[in-house]
Structure formats: structure tokens, C-alpha cells
């Protein structure tokens, strides 16, 4: 639009000039080397304009001839760029579709046309990953890591390839380098944080978390810091109780509903005589997440209290979560210790129709202590074999006997207090209609009358004679809970395969998961056991 306006202005000025000259006629006389030239002013003006136009045209042709080699080179480069772009685009689409033959074909073409292009290097790495050529993929990612514009992408690919090989030290080194180069990279920060948490470097993990505070949301930051502080408190509890107490209190302040932090902080406050503060802290955590650890700490709040005093405290605690099974179990245990058998039965009455293992075992102990009825106690133990599992600390198909800050794969705050996945639960029949359970009871060893039944429960549950009495296969005996502490449970049914399988985005250096053909390397951690094998 501006050019049109400028053109119109120039044309208008020329028209005004010619009109001005036409209104003022005159003659131009030129004498040169004895020759005499005479013409009008208008003709001279037109001649001068024609001369300037001819000079401009000659100059433009000269410039065009001078620049023609550069223009030809640019044209050829642009054409090869279009061909390279087309080859890279088709190659990335082939990688996404899983077409290895087409991916290799377009990769070779892209390398031939534009071997130094970043996208050509990425396509080469993706095609190598698709074909399982780890060395070629590693070489492509190293080439990208050696360039300034693709260094972050190359380090990400090298990190993933190192994890696939099981080289955790190398993966950590690549993540550390990427985090130094670009602190805003989320994957690098998570990888470094995961490594420090897995290695137990909680001070370093907390320092890294503080450095990435702005990139995290407020709630996420508080939760992660609370988990790390709780883990650090557990790590130094035996050697430095003062710092352990400070860490636990800060964790409970940041995340009052974090059960491990609240239980540890409440226990240490009670040991220091700060009973009111400990009571407030435990009550807040209990109302959010009732847990047996909190009930145990609350029961032992005052050292040396009688069993009836502990029962009163647990009664008040159970009233805060009416109808919750953890409150009922805590109340039944306290009542049983105080020999208030009626209160224990009343607490468990609403859960007897479909009892969990802990409910059935408490009922067995109650029958034995209150009535010395060994037969009924064994019946309840037999019912515990088929009872629904109680909640436990679970993460990624593993069960832990205690809370752990890091999962087997290294993920922070992965363990949750919930019932393990054991397939479809079947309601157990009543005590009077369990012939198979009666056989288990008959095979169970007798328990001395003067010893608590819960001390002999593991031996009863692991009695190998039960399988012979039941006449069942090992799988049947295992599903009945007779066999071992580390038992295999049926996984949930597999999900149907999608019509269009999901693939990794072409700009992703590759999946984190280990290929099916490669051996899996899992960290060996104590304190957890696998659900699925």
C-alpha cells in the first residue's frame, strides 16, 4: 500500500512538472565544435528523462549479471532444502508410524542432502532407535550433544540410552550436564533429583528442590519438601535425634497429612513432654488419613499409662472418624489389651460380614482370650486365609512393610496406603459353612493358652500341611494364603489393544521404558516385595 501511494505521488509530481514546463515555453540553443543545435525546452526535458531511464536499465542489467552466480547458488540451495525438508518430514512420519523400511530410506536421503541439519540428526537417531541399533542412536545423540543448537536434545537422548543400558551413573552424568547448561529443563531436574533421592542424598535433593522452587507449584513444592524432610529425619533418627525431630516437625508443618512425618513428629514431641502439641498434630493427621501408625503413637502418648487410660484416648480418637475401619481396629486392640471384651466386639461388629485379615485375626484373639475357645479362634484364623487384604504401603506393584520415600524405580512419594491389587475379590462364606477352612484349622498347631494368638498366626498361615488337607493344587493353596509371605497374586485382566496404537512423538528422543528384548535392571531395595512376578 505504501509503495502504491509513493508511486502515485511521483507520477503526480512529474505531471505537475510537465504542465509547468508547457505553460512556460522556451528554446534551448547549444553550440558545440562549430555546430549549432536549437530545440524546445520540452524536448530537452524528455531527452534527459530518457537518458536517466536508459542509464538505470543498464545499471540494473549489470547488477543482475554480477549477482547471477549467487542467485543460482541460492536457488539450488533452496531446492535442496525443500527436498531435505520433504525427506525429513516423511522420515519422521514413518518413524511415528513404525515403518522401519521407509524410515531408513528417508534417513539415508536426508543424510545425503543435508547431513548437518539438526532435524536430519534427530531423524537418524529416531530411525536407529526404531530399528534397535543402539550404537547408531548413541552416535547420533553424541553428534547432537556436540552442537550448541541441539545440545539439550542430544543430552536427553544420551540420558535415555544410558538408562536403557542400565548405566545409571552415566545417565546421571548426562542429566547433571543438561541441568547445568539449562536449569529450566524439567527432565534434567527430575532425573538429578531422582538420582539423589535414590542414593539417599537428601541434603543434595533438598538443595536442588530449592533451586527449582520457581518452576514448581506451591503445593507440589511443599509436598516434595515434606517428603524429603521426613526421609531425612528417618535416616538420622538413630544418630542425631535433635535434627531428626527438627526435620520431622518441619515436614509435618509443611504437609500435616503426611502420615510418616506426623507419626514421627508426634512420637518425638511426646518423648520431650510436649503432649498437647503432639496431640494436636496427631489429631490433624488422623482426621485426614486414619492410619495404624498414628493410632499406635497416640496410644503410647504417655509412657507408663495403664491399658484403660490408653483405651480412653483411643475411644476419643476413633470418634473423630466414625465408621472407619482403622478407628475400629485401633479401638478393638486397645479394648482387648484392657480386657474390655464387650467394647472390642462392638467395635468390630460392623466389619464381621466381610472381614479383612486384621479383623479376622483380632476376632480369633478375642475368642481365645475371652472364652479360651480354641476352636472358634482357629475358625477365625481359617477365615483370615481367604479374607480381603488390609491396606499397605504400595507402589508400582510392590508392597512395603513400612513407608519409603522412593519407589523401586526411583520415583519420589510413590508409596500410597491402600489395599494391594489382588484381582477380583470373592466374599468368603460364613464360619459355619467352611469345610476347606476346617481342614486348615485341623492342620494348624495348637497354641498354648497363656500366649497371645497373634504371635503364632504367621506359622499357622504358612503351614504346608494345609495344602495336603485341602487336596488343592499349589496355586489353590497359595490363593488361600497358606503359602509364603512373598506370594503371587493374580494381576488385573489386560486392557484391550487400541485400534490405533500410541506411538512416541517424533521430537521425543525415545521412550523411557526398557525394550522387551533387553534385560530389566531394577534397584535392589530392602523393605518391599513384588506383587506381580
Image (spheres, rainbow, N blue to C red):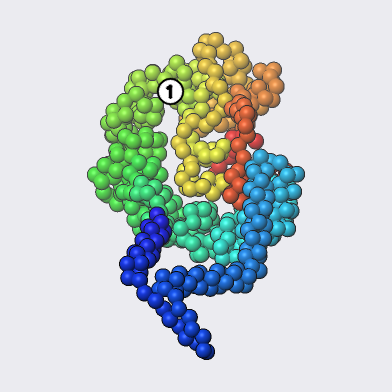
In the image, 196 versus 305, the foreground residue is 196
> Residue 439, how many percent across, how many down?
62, 16
Quadrant of the rendered image containing residue 8: bottom left
> Residue 285, how many percent across, how many down?
33, 39
111 in relation to 301, above or below = below
Residue at screen point 45% across, 24% down: 359
Relative horizontal placement of residue 189, taking residue 508 as reference (left or right): left
In which quadrant is the N terminus drawn? Answer: bottom left
**Is residue 146 in sight in this rendering?**
no
> Residue 443, how many percent across, how many down?
62, 21
Q: Which residue is mark 1?
A: 366
Relative horizontal placement of residue 214, taking residue 443 as reference (left or right): left
Quadrant of the rendered image containing residue 441: top right
In the image, 513 versus 528, the foreground residue is 513
Relative horizontal placement of residue 167, taking residue 269 as reference (left or right): right
514 in relation to 181, above or below = above
Residue at screen point 40% across, 39% down: 293
Relative horizontal placement of residue 97, taking residue 210 as reference (left or right): right
Q: How many marks?
A: 1
In the image, 106 versus 322, the foreground residue is 106
152 in relation to 260, above or below = below
**Is residue 350 in sight in this rendering?**
yes
Residue at screen point 56% across, 46% down: 408
Residue at screen point 46% across, 58% down: 184
497 in relation to 241, above or below = above
Residue at the far top in the pictured view: 433
Residue at the far left in the pictured view: 276
> Residue 303, how many percent across, how many down?
32, 44
Q: Residues within 10 Å of mark 1 (few under 14, many from 20)?
A: many
Query: SS class of the residue under badge 1?
Result: helix
In which quadrant is the C terminus drawn? Answer: top right
Amino acid at each position: 500500500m505504501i509503495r502504491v501511494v509513493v508511486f502515485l505521488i511521483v507520477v503526480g509530481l512529474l505531471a505537475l512538472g510537465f504542465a509547468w514546463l508547457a505553460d512556460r515555453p522556451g528554446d534551448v540553443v547549444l553550440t558545440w565544435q562549430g555546430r549549432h543545435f536549437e530545440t524546445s525546452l520540452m524536448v530537452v526535458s524528455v531527452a534527459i528523462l530518457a537518458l536517466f531511464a536508459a542509464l538505470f536499465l543498464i545499471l540494473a542489467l549489470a547488477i543482475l549479471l554480477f549477482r547471477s552466480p549467487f542467485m543460482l547458488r541460492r536457488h539450488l540451495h533452496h531446492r535442496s532444502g525443500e527436498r531435505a525438508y520433504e525427506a525429513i518430514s516423511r522420515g519422521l512420519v514413518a518413524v511415528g508410524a513404525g515403518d522401519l523400511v521407509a524410515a531408513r530410506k528417508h534417513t539415508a536421503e536426508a543424510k545425503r542432502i543435508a547431513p548437518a541439519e539438526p532435524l536430519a540428526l534427530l531423524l537418524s537417531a529416531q530411525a536407529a532407535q526404531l530399528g534397535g541399533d543402539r550404537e547408531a542412536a548413541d552416535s547420533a545423540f553424541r553428534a547432537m550433544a556436540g552442537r550448541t543448537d541441539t545440545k539439550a536434545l542430544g543430552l536427553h537422548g544420551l540420558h535415555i540410552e544410558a538408562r536403557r543400558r542400565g548405566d545409571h551413573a552415566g545417565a546421571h552424568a548426562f542429566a547433571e550436564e543438561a541441568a547445568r547448561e539449562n536449569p529450566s529443563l524439567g527432565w534434567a531436574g527430575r532425573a538429578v533429583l531422582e538420582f539423589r533421592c535414590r542414593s539417599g542424598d537428601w541434603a543434595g535433593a533438598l538443595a536442588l528442590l530449592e533451586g527449582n522452587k520457581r518452576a514448581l507449584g506451591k503445593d507440589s513444592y511443599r509436598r516434595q519438601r515434606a517428603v524429603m524432610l521426613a526421609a531425612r529425619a528417618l535416616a538420622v533418627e538413630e544418630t542425631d535425634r535433635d535434627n531428626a525431630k527438627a526435620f520431622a516437625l518441619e515436614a509435618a508443618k509443611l504437609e500435616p497429612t503426611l502420615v510418616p512425618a506426623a507419626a514421627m513428629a508426634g512420637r518425638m514431641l511426646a518423648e520431650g513432654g510436649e503432649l498437647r502439641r503432639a496431640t494436636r498434630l496427631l489429631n490433624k493427621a488422623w482426621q485426614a488419613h486414619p492410619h495404624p501408625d498414628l493410632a499406635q503413637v497416640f496410644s503410647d502418648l504417655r509412657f507408663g499409662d495403664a491399658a484403660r487410660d490408653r483405651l480412653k484416648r483411643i475411644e476419643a480418637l476413633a470418634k473423630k472418624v466414625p465408621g472407619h475401619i482403622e478407628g475400629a481396629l485401633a479401638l478393638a486392640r486397645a479394648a482387648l489389651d484392657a480386657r474390655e471384651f464387650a467394647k472390642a466386639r462392638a467395635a468390630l461388629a460392623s466389619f464381621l460380614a466381610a472381614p479383612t485379615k486384621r479383623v479376622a485375626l483380632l476376632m480369633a484373639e478375642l475368642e481365645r482370650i475371652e472364652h479360651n475357645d480354641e476352636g472358634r479362634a482357629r475358625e477365625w484364623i481359617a477365615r483370615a486365609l481367604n479374607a480381603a487384604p488390609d491396606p499397605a504401603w504400595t507402589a508400582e506393584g510392590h508392597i512395603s512393610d513400612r513407608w519409603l520415600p522412593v519407589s523401586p524405580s526411583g520415583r519420589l512419594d510413590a508409596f500410597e496406603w491402600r489395599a494391594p491389587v489382588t484381582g477380583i475379590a470373592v466374599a468368603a462364606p460364613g464360619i459355619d459353612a467352611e469345610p476347606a477352612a476346617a481342614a486348615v484349622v485341623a492342620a494348624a498347631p495348637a497354641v498354648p493358652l497363656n500366649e497371645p494368638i497373634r504371635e503364632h498366626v504367621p506359622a499357622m498361615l504358612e503351614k504346608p500341611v494345609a495344602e495336603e488337607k485341602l487336596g488343592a493344587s499349589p496355586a489353590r493353596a497359595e490363593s488361600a494364603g497358606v503359602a509364603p509371605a512373598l506370594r503371587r497374586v493374580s494381576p488385573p485382566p489386560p486392557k484391550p489393544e487400541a485400534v490405533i496404537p500410541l506411538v512416541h512423538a517424533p521430537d521425543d528422543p525415545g521412550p523411557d521404558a526398557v525394550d522387551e528384548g533387553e534385560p530389566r535392571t531394577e534397584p535392589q531395595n530392602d523393605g518391599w516385595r513384588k506383587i506381580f512376578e
